[in-house]
Image (cartoon, rainbow, N blue to C red):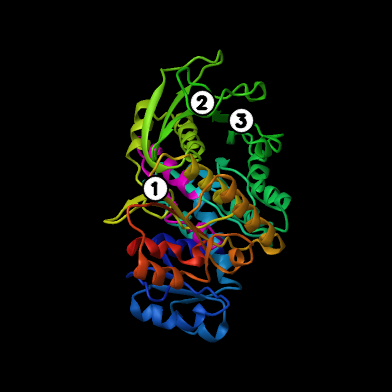
Amino acid sequence: MDISELYSIFAEHPVVTTDSRDCPEGSVFVALKGASFNGNKFAAAALEKGCAWAVVDEAEHAGGEHTILVDDCLKTLQQLARYHRRRLGTPIVGITGTNGKTTTKELTAAVLARKYNVLCTQGNFNNDIGVPKTLLRINAGHDIAVVEMGASHPGDIKTLVDIVEPDCGLITNVGRAHLQGFGSFEGVLRTKGELYDFLRTRSDSVTFVNAGDEHLTSITGGLTHIMKYGRGDCGSNRTGGGALAPAAEGVRIVGETVCCDPFLKFRWYERDDDGQPVDGIHEVHTNLIGSYNLDNMLAAIAVGRHFDVPSADISKALSAYTPSNNRSQLTVTKSNRLIVDAYNANPTSMAAAIDNFSNMEAEGKMAILGDMGELGEASAAEHAKIVRQLEDCGLNDVWLVGSEFAKTGCRYRKFQNVDEVKAEITANGPENRTILIKGSHSTGLYMLPEIL
C-alpha cells in the first residue's frame, strides 16, 4: 500500500498503537518485531480488542479485511510519521546529547508552553520507535513540538532526523557514553553531530549552541543561523560560572550560578549586540539539584527567546518545573535526604554529580553509586577514574554497586547488586544522612528511595 493511502486511513483513525495490550477503540495497530516478540502474531487480537486496522509485514497474518500487508512495519511507521510531519508543517525543535537531553526537553517544553500549545516527547521515548510515535501524536492544534532523539550506535541520529526533519535543534553536550556501541568519544561526537549535518541542509534552520562546549563549537561550521548561550558574569557577586572567554563573544543568553543549597539558583540575561542586558537580569530559584543543570536551563531559555516567549514567563516556567523522573531530584524521607539521579549514568554525568555533591553544604554525606553500563573496553578505566575522583574529593562513606565497581581496588564498601544493598539498608539503614544515589538504570538503584 502506498504511504499516502495508509495516511488516509490514519487521518480517519489518528491513534497508532504498537502494543496489543493497549488498543484504543478505532486505533491503528502496527505489528513491530524484536528479539523476543513478534507483533504480527497479535494483529488479530488487536482488531478484536478495538483497533480499526492492523498493519503487518508477514503474509500469514494478513488475511483479515482490515489488515494491511507491508514490507517492513517499522519502516512503514517511520514513513507514516514523516509524511504526517510534512503535511502538518508544525515547527519542531529537535534535541539530542549525551547528558541532560530529557531534562532539557522538559524545560524547553515548559518554557514554550507559556505561550504556545506544545507537544513533546513523553518520558524518554527517543528511539526509532518512540520518535515516530511522538510525531504521530502531533495534531493541527499544536503550535510547536519538542522532540528528543537518543542514540547508542553510529547513524542513529541521522535515522531520526531524517524522520523528524527539525526546524531548530540543539545538542546538550557530548560525553563518554555508550562507548561499546560508538567505539570512541569521536564516534559519539560524529553521531550527535548528525543533527547539525541535517540543519546545515536547511537555509532557515536555527541551531542553539552552548558556547562553552568546545566539542560542539568545533563542529558548527556551515550552520546558517546560530544562537549561542553560555555561562558568564551577570554583573553581581557570583559563585561559579566565570566570565566568558573572548572566543565566546556573540553569546545571546548568559547565565551564572548563584548557589546550590541544594537547589540550583541562577541569574540570566539576554544581551544585545553591545553585550548589555535587553530587559534586565533575572533570578530563578529552581527545583533541580546540581550546577550542571545551568546549561540545560540556558538552553531552554535560548529556545524560548527565539520563539518570543517573554523573559518573565520563561523564569516563571523554570521556577515551577519540578522533576519526577529520578533526574536531579531531591527526595526527603522520614530518615534521610536523598539526591536521586538514578535514571542513568555514564562517566560524564557521574563525574558531574560527584563534583556537585562534594561541593554541597550538607551534614552526613553518603553516596550509593552503581555501575555505568555500555562502556565496552573502556569500562575498567572509567570506573577506576570515578573511584579516584571519590578519593580526591574526600567522600568517605561510599557504597559501590555492581560487577564493574567490584573490580576496582579501593577501600569503599562494595555490593554485587541492588538486592544486597536493600538487605543492608533493611538491617542497618542509614539515618540523618544526605545521600547521593547515582547509577545506570540496569543497576536498579532507583528502587532505593522507597526504603531509605
Find numbered disc 3 in the image and state the secondary structure of the residue it sits on.
strand
Is disc 1 surrounded by few (<14), some (14 to 19) or many (20+) residues within 10 Å?
Answer: few
Report whether 428 appears left or right of 127. left
| Residue at x-position 55% and y-position 30% | 230
The type of residue carrying mark 3 is: His
Q: Quadrant of the C terminus?
A: bottom left
Say if residue 334 shows up in the picture: yes
Find numbered disc 1 in the image and state the secondary structure of the residue it sits on.
loop
Distance CA(mark 1)–CA(mark 2): 35 Å
Residue pointed to by mark 2? 254
Report whether 6 appears left or right of 205. left
| Residue at x-position 59% and y-position 24% | 244
Residue pointed to by mark 3? 225
Per the rendered image, the range of residues in magenta is 102-131
The type of residue carrying mark 2 is: Val
- Image spot of residue 391 (x, y percent): 58, 50
Q: Nearer the viewer, residue 11 or 318?
A: 318
Find numbered disc 2 in the image and state the secondary structure of the residue it sits on.
strand
- Image spot of residue 137 (x, y percent): 42, 56
Disc 1 versus disc 2: nearer the observer: 2
Is disc 3 surrounded by few (<14), some (14 to 19) or many (20+) residues within 10 Å?
Answer: some
Answer with mark 1 or mark 3, whichever residue precedes in sequence. 1
Answer with mark 1 or mark 2, whichever residue precedes in sequence. 1
Disc 1 versus disc 3: nearer the observer: 3
The type of residue carrying mark 1 is: Ala
The answer to whether the residue labelled 1 contacts the one labelled 3, judged by CB atoms less than 8 Å apart, is: no
Residue pointed to by mark 1? 140
Q: Nearer the viewer, residue 399 or 262?
A: 399
Query: Is 134 drawn above or below residue 2 in the view shown?
Result: above
